[in-house]
Amino acid sequence: MGRHTFALLAVLLLGGSAALAQTPPNVDAAADQVFNRVMSPYCPGRVLATCPSGAAEVLRQEVRRDLEAGKSPETIEAGLYQRFGESIRGLPRTDGIGLLAWVFPAAVFTLTGIWLVVWLRRPHRGDEASGDLKAPAASPAILERLEDELADLS
């Protein structure tokens, strides 16, 4: 008999199956999801998870009770939006005008990338048509002076 089978039998024998059936699955994870997706109606600019207000703590406890009662996170969020208004929505909606908040940044990022590629591929000022950069020709007077300076150094 493997360890996992033995552990499962021990849990069943100790009455763990009855306790597991009564406990809603992942209440803490679902509560954290709601707390981090909803802005606090009591602390402007903060999500419900980080608001230190006592009223926010009462609201967090209410959300936990609703989750333990079997309500889905989506239903709870919808109730909060109805109760406090759309201003507490932490993320824009994925329909209607809210869809623009998701699509616009992606479109700007894509178009900027395309523009950058085109800009980098085109010839820039100072580039020759052949792609070779040639040094300007020096006058004979400058070449003679350079030779004199080099001779003085040795």
Image (tube, rainbow, N blue to C red):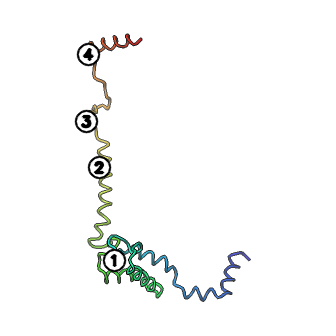
Task: Give me the C-alpha separation between circle 4 and circle 1.
Answer: 78 Å
Q: Quadrant of residue 63?
A: bottom left
Judging by the rendered image, the residue that carries numbered circle 4 is: 139
Judging by the rendered image, the residue that carries numbered circle 3 is: 125
Of the pair 133 and 144, the residue shown nearer to us: 144
Q: Which is more N-terminal, label 2 or label 1?
A: 1
Disc 1 versus disc 3: nearer the observer: 1
Q: Which is more N-terminal, label 4 or label 2?
A: 2
Task: Give me the C-alpha separation between circle 3 and circle 4.
Answer: 25 Å
Q: Dot 3: few (<14), some (14–19), or many (≥20) neighbours within 10 Å? A: few
Judging by the rendered image, the residue that carries numbered circle 2 is: 115
For image coordinates 34% across by 10% down, the residue present is 148
Q: Determine contact: label 1, label 2, CB under 8 Å.
A: no
Judging by the rendered image, the residue that carries numbered circle 1 is: 42
Task: Give me the C-alpha separation between circle 1 and circle 2.
Answer: 44 Å
> Which quadrant of the figure contains the C terminus?
top left
